[in-house]
Image (cartoon, helix red, strand yellow):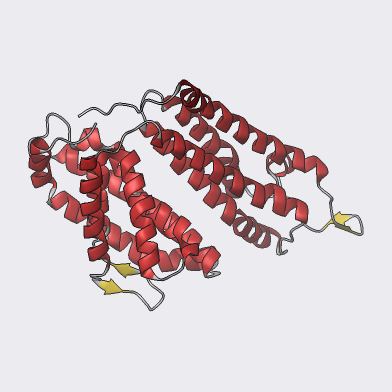
């Protein structure tokens, strides 16, 4: 069943048409400011020796303050992800799924920008034995500015995507049923890992089905925004956990929607290796993205260092992901029959 784009007034259509250019200009402006920030850096010196390096984008590319892996982390965060996201927005005019890819890339850039200080500080300490200090200049150009820039760009990309699809009464009903199932399964805990959270359950299974049935865009809106917000409010860990544990963590299932044509192709009539293979691949990518969001939340909300955050989240995120992937593969055959009776959206 093909979707038709919404029809708006000529003025609004023009605004939507030129919004990708505005996002590209906004991202390029941020990148330019990050480079320019290098020239405004006030170096702190003791006896003529700089006590610690700055870490704006220009410093990383031209100053060589950090090791290779850390330098590449900066490059991926500040150059590769945002520029690929901008490219995805322009490709979205041909396929709306590219808009979702742009949203995820901008979110990943924002998350990386948040943890970049810890990564840089750890690298400097390991390589030289010195702690990394922070100037107001560094806090602005390499911390506050990129986080705000990437989140705004991600929201703008999501707004473009939302303006290009229609959500029908059938969509609302099906998404509502699957979200209700996920909420119930969230309270049926297979294993509870500590009082601070981290339980293993089947809540991701209905969300994965949602992404496969409705595609990545509606999967992100339903799982990440709608279910994520409801789950955040009912779990009781505080709204501060929403962006990473819920919006990104639950919305990560939308990745499965990208594999929809390969999992529910025309030649699929029952269980088959191709479909199960891409269920596993999509499920693993989704779980990894949820793990990234969970680690970031642990570092920001609970003050864990990066190793402690990874150790905590790996205990339940990958187990929950594996449980959901196995369950989804088990019901793959019946899902194909259901999809033949109630065709999925392309």
Q: Residue 254: image x %, image y %?
A: 33, 44
Please tell me which residue lies in front, 12 or 79. Answer: 12
User: Is 52 displayed left or right of 164 in the figure?
Assistant: right
The answer to whether residue 137 is seen in the rendering is yes
User: Is 217 displayed left or right of 58 in the figure?
Assistant: left
Please tell me which residue lies in front, 304 or 252. Answer: 252
Looking at this rendering, what residue extends furthest in the front direction? 9
Q: Residue 150: image x %, image y %?
A: 56, 43
Q: Residue 243: image x %, image y %?
A: 47, 56
Q: Quadrant of residue 327?
A: bottom left
Above or below for 145 versus 249: above
Q: Quadrant of residue 215?
A: top left
Q: Quadrant of the N terminus?
A: top left
Please tell me which residue lies in front, 143 or 66. Answer: 143
Residue lying at 52% horizontally and 67% vertically, measured from the top left: 301
Q: Residue 300: image x %, image y %?
A: 55, 64
Residue lying at 12% horizontally and 29% vertically, measured from the top left: 267
Above or below for 3 versus 217: above
Residue lying at 45% horizontally and 63% vertically, measured from the top left: 310
Residue lying at 63% horizontally and 57% vertically, measured from the top left: 117
Looking at this rendering, what residue extends furthest in the top direction? 10
Q: Quadrant of the C terminus?
A: top left
Please tell me which residue lies in front, 253 or 155. Answer: 155
The answer to whether residue 68 is seen in the rendering is no
User: Is 105 displayed left or right of 169 in the figure?
Assistant: right
């Amino acid at each position: 069943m093909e979707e038709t784009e919404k029809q708006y007034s000529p003025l609004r259509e023009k605004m939507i048409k030129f919004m990708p250019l505005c996002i590209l200009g906004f991202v390029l402006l941020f990148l330019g400011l990050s480079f320019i920030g290098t020239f405004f850096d006030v170096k702190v010196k003791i006896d003529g020796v700089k006590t610690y390096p700055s870490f704006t984008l220009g410093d990383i590319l031209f100053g060589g303050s950090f090791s290779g892996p850390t330098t590449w982390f900066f490059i991926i965060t500040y150059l590769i992800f945002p520029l690929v996201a901008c490219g995805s927005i322009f490709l979205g005019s041909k396929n709306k799924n590219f808009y979702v890819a742009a949203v995820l890339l901008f979110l990943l850039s924002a998350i990386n920008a948040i943890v970049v200080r810890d990564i840089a500080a750890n690298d400097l300490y390991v390589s030289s034995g010195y702690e990394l200090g922070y100037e107001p200049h560094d806090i602005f150009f390499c911390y506050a500015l990129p986080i705000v820039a990437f989140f705004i760009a991600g929201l703008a990309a999501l707004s473009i995507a939302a303006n290009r699809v229609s959500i029908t009464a059938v969509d609302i009903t099906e998404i509502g049923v699957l979200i209700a199932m996920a909420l119930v399964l969230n309270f049926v805990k297979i294993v509870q890992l500590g009082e601070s959270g981290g339980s293993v359950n089947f809540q991701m299974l209905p969300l994965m089905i949602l992404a496969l049935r409705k595609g990545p865009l509606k999967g992100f809106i339903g799982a990440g925004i709608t279910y994520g917000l409801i789950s955040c409010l009912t779990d009781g860990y505080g709204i501060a956990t929403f962006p990473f544990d819920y919006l990104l963590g639950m919305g990560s299932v939308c990745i499965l929607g990208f594999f929809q044509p390969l999992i529910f192709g025309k030649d699929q009539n029952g269980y088959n290796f191709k479909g199960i293979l891409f269920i596993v691949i999509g499920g693993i990518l989704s779980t990894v993205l949820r793990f990234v969001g969970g680690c970031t939340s642990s570092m920001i909300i609970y003050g864990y260092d990066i190793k402690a955050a990874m150790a905590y989240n790996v205990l339940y995120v990958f187990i929950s992901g594996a449980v959901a992937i196995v369950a989804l593969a088990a019901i793959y055959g019946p899902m194909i029959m259901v999809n033949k009776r109630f065709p999925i959206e392309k």
